[in-house]
Structures are given as C-alpha cells and as structure tokens.
Image (cartoon, grey):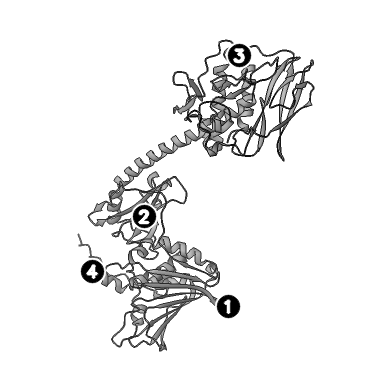
C-alpha cells in the first residue's frame, strides 16, 4: 500500500491589503465608540487633560480631540514616528509595553486610529517633535495611503496630540456634545475615575460645554458580594440593587472600559442580570475581546472561567432580588389596602347607614335633628379627627388643643351623607352636609347652608342647618336634593339622590357582628376556579393570585387595584347580607362598586 503523501504546510497571508484595511477600519459599528478609542489613546499616553471640540469651520462640521499626554513616540531624529504608526496596523507598540509590565494601558491592536473612517472623510494627527516643531500625518477615508509633513514651529513648547476629523459624515453630524458626554461618562467610567483625567467637551454648534464625570449608579450598593478570584485574575464587582427599571443594566468591562451589556451574553440571560433590579459593572481584565469592535468577547477558556466564577454571584443576586420583591409586594399590599379602606369609608358615607352598617365601619354620632328625626347621622369609625373633624380619642392629653396641622383650612368641598338612599313614601330621613378643606379635614367654622329639593318633591325641615330632615312625598319618585355651603366668599355645592318607594327591602336577619374592614392576603392556586374567599377567623380576604383574572389585572397597578377592590365588594356583600336572594346581592354589589370606584385611587 502506498504511503500517504504528507500534506504541505503554509502560512495564511493577506491577499488584498487594501481590502483588509477597509474591513478593519469599518469594523467599528458605533461612531461614539470611535471617539472613545481616541480618548483612550490619550489616557494611555498619560494625558491629564483631554479637550473635545465639536464645531463647524468653512461650512464643514468637524471633531477635534486634543490632549497633553506624551504624544506620538519619537524616532532617532526626535520626530514623531508617524511611519511606525502607519505601517504597523494590528501590531501596536502597546502590546510590547504590556508584555514588559506597563500598567493602565488599554489598547493593544493598533487599529483604533483607523476607526476615523466611521466618523469623517479625513484625519489629521498632529504631534510635536523634540524641538517643539509640530508635525502632521494625514489620512483619507477609503485610501490606504498617508502623508507626513512639517507643520510649524510654536512660540511655546507644546506636547500631546491633536486629532482632527473633518468633515464629519452626514449620518452622524447631528450627534450632540451632550450625547457624547453621557456616552463617555458610562463607557470610560472607571478609566476616568482611576486615572483622574479631566475630559472637557465644547459643543460650539449647540453653544454648550460639559465636563465628563464618571457615571453614578442609583440604588443600594450590594456589599454582600465579594469579587470572585479565578486562576486568570480577580473579577471586580460594583453592583447596585433597586426597584426594577428598563434602564438598569449591568455592564461588562475590561480594565475600566465598557465592553458589552452582560445580560446579552451567552450564559448570563438570567433574571439576576436581565430583570432590571441590578445595575453596575462587572470588570474582568483577563477576558479576550474581538479586535475589530472591542464590543464582543471571545468564547474561549478565559470566558468559560469567567462564567463559572460568576455562578455563585448569580445565585446570591437571585436571593437579594427575591427579598426585594417580597418587600415591594408587602409595601404594594399596604398601599392597596389603604386605598381600598379609604374608598370604602367614602363610599359608606354616601350610602344609607341602616343598609350598610356593617364591619364596624359606622359609629353613631348623635346630633340634634329636631323632633321626629328618623336616624342618627353616622360617620366612619376609622376616620380620625384630622380626616373628618368628628370626636373621639386622638391620643392627645385631655385639655390639650389640636396641633397646628390639625386645624382646618378654608372650605374646599362639600358632600351630602348619604348621597344615595331609599325612603318609603311619606317617611322622613336625616341628611348631613360634610364640609372639607383641600386636605380633607372637616371645616366647621363660619359656614352657612341652603338646602333645596331640585327634583322629585318633598320638603326640608330647617333648610339652613348642617343636618336637616327630609320629608318624602306621598308618591313614588326619584328626588334630587342639593346643598350649597358658603364660607365667606367661597361657595361649594353637592347633591344626593333619594329613591321614594312604596316598600323597602326586608331587614337583614342573622347579620354577623361587625368586625372592622378586613385585610387581605394571597394564596397562589393556579388552575383553581375560585378568585377569593373570606377567612372569618383571621378577618382577611384570601385572594387567589394564581387565577387567570388576577394575572390579567397585574398588567397595570390601577387595574389590579380595581380588581382587588371588586373582590372586597363581593366578599363583604356575601358576608353581610346572609339569606339575600341573588338579585338583591347583585344589586348591592353594583351599588357599592359604583360609589367605591368613584373614590378609588
């Protein structure tokens, strides 16, 4: 059998240098990243000050970056070695400096200068020689050539580099100094903070200037996490926890320069990194970046080590997020319960006390209603002196006056209690005008009242008092009552509707004792048909937060609040009208929901 001929070996070579340079120069997809590359070159050169100017000259928009760093390395004659810069694409001198132990240098590919192709048509690079003479190197977009010339001598010795790109490409001429400011503050956050470099942006087109300061994160800094150590180096964590937001994302950095959004990378598309609860940076200096854009990470052994090192961090973040979610749910539940209880108090002020005097929501407040008064006026028990201005122990010592904030302001609104009621023909009922200031404190001083029967007939006894007695007509009808309350030059109006009927609904029998408005709790039972149930022993309404209706209502806070309020109405009506027929229960639910949702917010 013939021996298999050994294959020939060779080395890859660039077949078309011009095409290769074009691909490299246009690999940077974000023009702002190209500007960041120029600024990083200045930082690597030891610059303490970097000035960026955006302007227009002779009708052409330009971008100029000037620094006070070490400038372009010089050749043996003391001139800037532009030839080395132009002929060592992909072979940066910084790589050799890093190998020799230089710290704080970011670039290593020698292609950052070519990214001007994504910004403008030409680049002029100016740097001084040893004797102070300025030299220029110019390059044109879509041209692999370069030109070096002597510029001029300066009166005062200068240092550093000036990069001038003009004219800017049409598609990016409108990117503003402000946008560049925010980008650099995030992109170079740690490099600015660690080096103390001062970056100033002057936008002559918009006539504004900015000083780039490292981006500050919101939320609570997570101290529970230590930077994990790997065989290749230590990973630095600076993470913050706060309420979720689409703007809150974790950035992956290398040596202080942002590379990519961590949650978008393979292996990190998990709630800990994508839910919007966590903001901050993860800095891994040992990762290998894609040379063309430096916004991607090579999935090599270093990346695999990075993933494994962050697994415990992911687990801890999941725990912290779960704790924050539970705390937020508790706060949301308290806010929801307060809103529902407030709405119930207002609704029960507007409804007849004898029909809705349950759950210990009403208490008697006997006032002089004149002879023959049918019902004492009732006021919600939960409402404090500051809310409604009615008596009760408010915790102050006997004889001490109210605090300053408890005094009512000027009249702002008036309401009639009850605002809806049913009266039998020829019978009487008491009504009260509730006057409040802008903060809903009860107003009692300097008031005058005028009650009228606007529609439906009937009459008032003492139509100029706060509490009046209405005499119903002898025929069934719907009466509309109005009151005008005045305090000096301020006048407010309110109305109530009274149904005059020949027969009333039968009185409730077997009604449970009053217990106070219940709270609520969740029980997750997906796949079950029940929405809620009343737990008598704990005096809470148990809500099935796994029900499809609850899940649907959770799309917005307002919708969920209305859904929970309707469950309260269902449970309270069922609980407090035992033995009522289905039509009567539905009538009660509709009536209560109407007045409840009016005050729900």
- Image coordinates for residue 216, horizontal then vertical, percent: 41, 56
- Residue to which mark 3 is pinned: 580
- Image coordinates for residue 168, horizontal then vertical, percent: 52, 73
- Residue to which mark 2 is pinned: 281
Q: Residues within 10 Å of mark 1 (few under 14, many from 20)?
A: few
Q: Residues within 10 Å of mark 2 (few under 14, many from 20)?
A: many
Q: Toward the viewer: 13 or 299? A: 299
Reading the chain from its start, which is encountered first: label 4 or label 1? 1
What distance separates the C-alpha of mark 3 from that of mark 4? 88 Å
- Report how many numbered discs are placed on residues in the image: 4
Figure quadrant of residue 600 = top right
Reading the chain from its start, which is encountered first: label 2 or label 1? 1
Relative to residue 461, is residue 134 depicted above or below?
below
Do the CB atoms of the residues marked 4 and 1 lie less than 8 Å apart?
Answer: no
- Residue to which mark 1 is pinned: 59
Q: Residue furthest top?
A: 509
Q: Residues within 10 Å of mark 4 (few under 14, many from 20)?
A: few
Q: Toward the viewer: 236 or 95? A: 236
Foreground: disc 3 or disc 4: 3
- Residue to which mark 4 is pinned: 101
Foreground: disc 2 or disc 3: 3
On-image quarter of the N terminus = bottom left
What distance separates the C-alpha of mark 4 from that of mark 1? 47 Å
Reading the chain from its start, which is encountered first: label 3 or label 1? 1
């Amino acid at each position: 059998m013939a021996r298999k001929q050994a294959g020939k070996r060779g080395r890859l070579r660039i077949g078309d240098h011009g095409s290769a340079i074009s691909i490299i120069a246009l690999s940077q997809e974000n023009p702002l990243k190209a500007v960041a590359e120029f600024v990083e070159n200045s930082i690597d050169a030891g610059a303490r000050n970097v000035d960026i100017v955006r302007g227009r000259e002779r009708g052409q928009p330009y971008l100029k970056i000037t620094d006070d760093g070490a400038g372009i390395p010089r050749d043996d004659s003391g001139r800037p070695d532009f030839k080395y810069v132009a002929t060592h694409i992909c072979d940066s001198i910084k790589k050799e400096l890093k190998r020799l132990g230089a710290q704080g240098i970011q670039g290593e590919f020698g292609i950052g200068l070519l990214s001007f192709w994504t910004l403008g048509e030409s680049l002029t690079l100016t740097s001084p020689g040893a004797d102070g003479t300025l030299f220029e190197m110019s390059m044109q977009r879509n041209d692999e050539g370069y030109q070096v010339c002597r510029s001029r001598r300066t009166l005062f010795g200068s240092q550093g580099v000036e990069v001038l790109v003009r004219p800017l490409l049409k598609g990016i001429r409108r990117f503003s100094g402000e946008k560049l400011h925010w980008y650099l503050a995030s992109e170079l956050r740690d490099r600015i903070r660690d080096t103390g470099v001062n970056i100033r942006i002057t936008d002559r087109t918009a006539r504004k200037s900015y000083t780039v300061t490292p981006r500050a994160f919101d939320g609570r800094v997570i101290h529970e996490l230590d930077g994990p150590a790997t065989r290749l180096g230590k990973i630095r964590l600076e993470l913050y926890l706060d309420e979720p937001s689409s703007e809150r994302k974790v950035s992956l950095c290398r040596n202080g320069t942002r590379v990519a959004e961590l949650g978008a990378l393979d292996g990190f598309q998990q709630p800990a990194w994508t839910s919007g609860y966590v903001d901050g940076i993860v800095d891994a200096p040992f990762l290998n970046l894609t040379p063309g854009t430096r916004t991607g990470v090579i999935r090599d052994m270093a990346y695999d080590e990075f993933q494994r090192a962050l697994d415990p961090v992911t687990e801890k973040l999941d725990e912290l997020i779960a704790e924050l979610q539970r705390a937020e749910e508790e706060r949301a539940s308290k806010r929801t319960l307060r809103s529902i209880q407030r709405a119930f108090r207002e609704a029960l002020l507007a409804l007849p006390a004898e029909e809705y005097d349950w759950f210990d929501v009403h208490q008697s407040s006997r006032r002089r209603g004149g002879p023959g008064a049918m019902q004492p006026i009732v006021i919600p028990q939960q409402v404090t002196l500051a809310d409604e201005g009615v008596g009760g122990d408010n915790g102050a010592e006997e004889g001490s006056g109210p605090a300053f904030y408890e005094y009512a302001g000027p009249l702002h609104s008036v309401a009639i209690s009850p605002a809806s009621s049913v009266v039998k023909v020829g019978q009487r009922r008491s009504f009260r005008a509730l006057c409040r200031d802008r903060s809903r404190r009860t107003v009692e001083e300097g008031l005058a009242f005028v009650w009228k029967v606007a529609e439906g007939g009937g009459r008032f006894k003492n139509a100029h008092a706060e509490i009046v007695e209405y005499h119903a007509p002898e025929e069934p009808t719907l009466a509309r009552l109005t009151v005008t309350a005045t305090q000096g030059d301020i006048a407010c109006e309110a109305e109530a509707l009274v149904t005059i009927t020949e027969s009333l609904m039968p009185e409730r029998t077997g009604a449970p004792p009053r217990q106070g408005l219940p709270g609520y709790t969740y029980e997750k039972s997906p796949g079950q048909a029940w929405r809620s149930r009343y737990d008598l022993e704990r005096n809470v309404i148990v809500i099935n937060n796994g029900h499809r209706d609850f899940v649907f209502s959770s799309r917005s806070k307002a919708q969920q609040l209305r859904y929970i309020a309707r469950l309260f109405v269902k449970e309270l009506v069922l609980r407090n009208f035992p033995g009522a027929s289905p039509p009567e229960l539905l009538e009660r639910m509709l009536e209560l929901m109407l007045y409840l949702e009016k005050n729900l917010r």
